[in-house]
Amino acid sequence: MDGLLRCSYYAFGPNRLHYCGPDANQEIAAYMKEGIMDPGLESLLKAFRTMYPYLLHIARANKIDNPFDEKVVEAYWIGNELLDAVDKKEFYRHLIDDQKINKKLNLKSFGILKNKMRQGAVPHHSFHVLNIWRRTGHLDQEHTLESMDQCRISWGKIVSVDGPFVVVKYQPLVLSGGKLSLGEITSKKITRNLNASLEIDELKVDDEITLHWGVICEKINGKQVAELKKYTNLSLYFANQTI
């Protein structure tokens, strides 16, 4: 699958809710439905002020010219070996120069974040969601438990398909004893978007999928589930140091 199109599947969920990216959810949905990749879609995705700098950072660290290379896109949203090549000092500079996180957090909070980077934090989507409590899209407010669960990329297994409705078994984010963790497996009913890709239209029982803000992004394999779980747990480990 083309990296541009794959990235749009993940970016669409928060964009349709006007949380981040340009006011162009209908245009992005049309690209997804038709499976078209062109400079127009690239321009739309470059307007995501948090996501795109992360993609650039991962690509440069791995000497990849195209920030929408499929492996780069996968590294940010799901996780893969490209994250291992990101230097801790460069990640720190990225958060200051590209994300301007030092201007969005107080001095103490940014110092704590810097310490997490020294310990091995990586530029994975879940790290940003779970460890930078202020949203960095269009909403300048703190995350709640519910919004963090919606914003992180979660994964689950399909247990039933009924027309546009899909029931998924997944582990929600929970707060217990003052710590964040993945909770007991529960069911979640999802309505497939009318502009969903052919792959999403053809989902069947036992398929593993990813979710972002209530939108099914794509079908993934066992290795990708393991990678996403690994990096999510790493991000939870860092988050629990300061909750």
Image: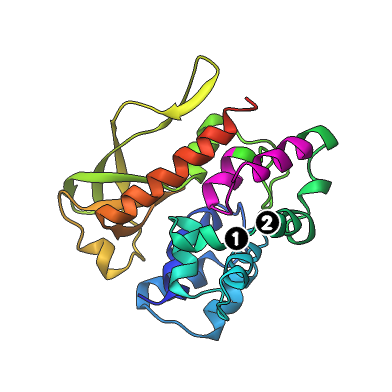
**Viewer-closest of 223 and 133:** 223
Q: Secondary structure at mark 2?
A: helix
Q: Give the image location of residue 102, x and y in percent.
A: 81, 47
**Viewer-closest of 99 and 84:** 84
Task: Specify the label residue 68 is tagged with.
Answer: none
Q: Give the image location of residue 207, x and y in percent.
A: 20, 53
The furthest residue to the bottom: 38
Looking at the image, residue 220 lies above or below residue 4 = above
Q: Give the image location of residue 122, x and y in percent.
A: 57, 51
Answer left or right for 183 relative to 122.
left
Cβ–Cβ under 8 Å for marks 1 and 2: yes
Q: Quadrant of the N terminus?
A: bottom left
Check residue 197 for magenta coloring. no
Q: Amino acid at mark 1?
A: Val
Q: Residue at x 73, y 56 (%)?
A: 99
Report the magenta residues as a range.
Answer: 110-130
Q: Amino acid at mark 2?
A: Phe
- Give the labeled residue for mark 1: 86
| Mark earlier in primary sequence (1, 2) | 1
Q: Residues within 10 Å of mark 1 (few under 14, many from 20)?
A: many
Answer left or right for 160 relative to 143.
left
- Give the labeled residue for mark 2: 91
Answer left or right for 203 relative to 228.
left
